[in-house]
Amino acid sequence: MKTLSRTFTVAGFATLLTAFVGATAAQAATSVTLPDEGTLLGDGAGVSVSASFDCEAGWSANVWIEAAQRTDGDKVATGMGYSETVDCMAGEESVDVVLLAAGDYIAFEEGDAVVRVSVSACNTQTCDQAVAAGVVQVSEDDQ
């Protein structure tokens, strides 16, 4: 009887472990896409960036964006901003985030900026995060 009991215990543990691993893998559904461009605001006092990301229906997400850009001379313009909470509807979501000049308040200019987009999405039991970083073209709004 001891052998039969141990077999059921091991089989039960293996089933529980498989279910747990399967549930964990299903949670990793948040992803973010680095935008191609950003728009200068207020003569360079800020930059508007539109972030696109995927998250599960019923989850909520927050987006945090940071930017750095070398300007004329040896100065670096930096900025950061975050979104309001977004209620995810299965599939791709998009939110505009305004980054305000920070640090020494050096203005952003037209040209390349290094940008990092972070998304944190949560449901009532867990959270998932995604990050994308790279170069974004910053330009004046043509309107």
Image: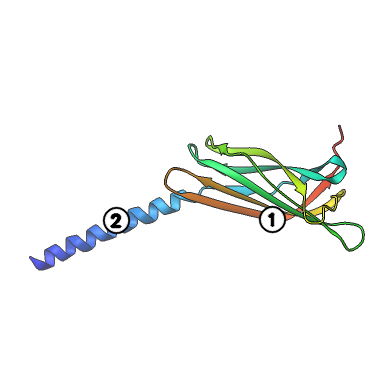
Could you say where residue 134 lies in the image, as x and y percent from the top left?
72, 56
Give me the residue at 42% from left, 53% from top: 24
Could you say where residue 101 lies in the image, as x and y percent from the top left?
79, 49
Could you say where residue 126 lies in the image, as x and y percent from the top left?
45, 49
Question: Would residue 135 appear left or right of 123 to someone viewing this image?
Answer: right
Foreground: 137 or 65? 65
Rate crowding at label 1 as few (under 14), some (14 to 19) or many (20 or more) other CA atoms within 10 Å: some
Q: Is residue 22 above or below residue 10?
A: above
Amino acid identity at mark 2:
Leu
| Corner quadrant of residue 75 | bottom right
Residue ID for mark 1: 133
Which label is found at residue 86? none
Outermost residue on the front side: it is 104
Give me the residue at 51% from left, 48% from top: 29
Q: Is residue 57 above or below residue 19?
A: above
Q: Element at badge 1? A: strand
Which label is found at residue 16? 2
Q: Element at badge 2? A: helix
The number of numbered badges drawn on the structure is 2
Amino acid identity at mark 1:
Ala
Question: Would residue 20 appear left or right of 29 to someone viewing this image?
Answer: left
Outermost residue on the left side: it is 1
Could you say where residue 17 lies in the image, as x and y percent from the top left?
32, 58
Outermost residue on the bottom side: it is 3
